[in-house]
Amino acid sequence: MSALVDRVSDELKKAMLAKDAGRTTALRMIRAAFIELAKEGKGEVTDDRCLDALRRLKKQREESIQSYEQAGRAELAAAERAELAVVDGFLPQLADEATTLGWVREAIAASGATNAREFGKVMGVLMKTHKSDIDATLARTLITRELGG
């Protein structure tokens, strides 16, 4: 098992002892996602796979918040925000725009890309070296801007 799985289990125990219902619910959701990873049969549950699962959970929470707000369901959006805060607590901090821009420029130089049609080459190099540290949406915007797309 990964260190992240152990950390979530420890946090869950603490939340349950503290009778923190909201945090307990969010941690159970995270643990359930990790259990699903183990059931997939794709090998060992590593920290990288756990981080991917956490990113999916984060994206789901963000989409739910948006939907609830559009429907005027502020109480449900607030509950999703609370879960999102717990998920964010386990995700590494992503690089800021200046750092990402530096990495994008390095990836452009390494890939030899000269125009926007070679976007995929640059993104491939970038993700290979900085996948867990970078916001892909920000990277996409910066690559497009740098390549004149």
Image: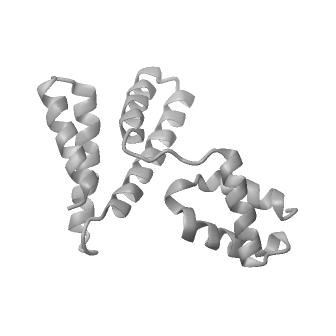
58, 12: nearer the viewer: 12
The quadrant in which residue 113 appears is bottom right
Taking the spot 35% from the left edge, 63% from the top edge, the residue there is: 49
Which residue, as the protein is rendered here, is positioned at the far left? 17
Q: Residue placed farthest to the right in the image?
A: 148
Kindly identify the residue that appears in the image at 72 percent across and 66 percent down: 106
**In what quadrant of the picture does the C terminus appear?**
bottom right
Quadrant where the N terminus sits is: bottom left
Residue 82 location, x and y as percent?
38, 29
Q: What is the number of callouts on the image? A: 0
Q: In this view, does 99 lie to the left or right of 144?
A: left
Residue 27: x and y in percent read 26, 40
Q: Is residue 47 left or right of residue 126?
A: left
Give x and y (percent) for residue 57: 40, 48
64 relative to 37 in the view: left or right: right
Model colouring? one colour
Q: Could you tell me which residue is drawn at 41 percent across and 58 percent down?
A: 52
Identify whether 59 is placed above or below 72.
below
- Indicate left or right for 14 with 89 as reference: left
* Residue at x 63% of width, y 72% of height: 125
Task: Name above or below for residue 14 compared with residue 88.
Answer: above
Q: In this view, does 56 lie above or below 122?
A: above
The picture places residue 61, in percent across and down from the top left corner, at 44, 40
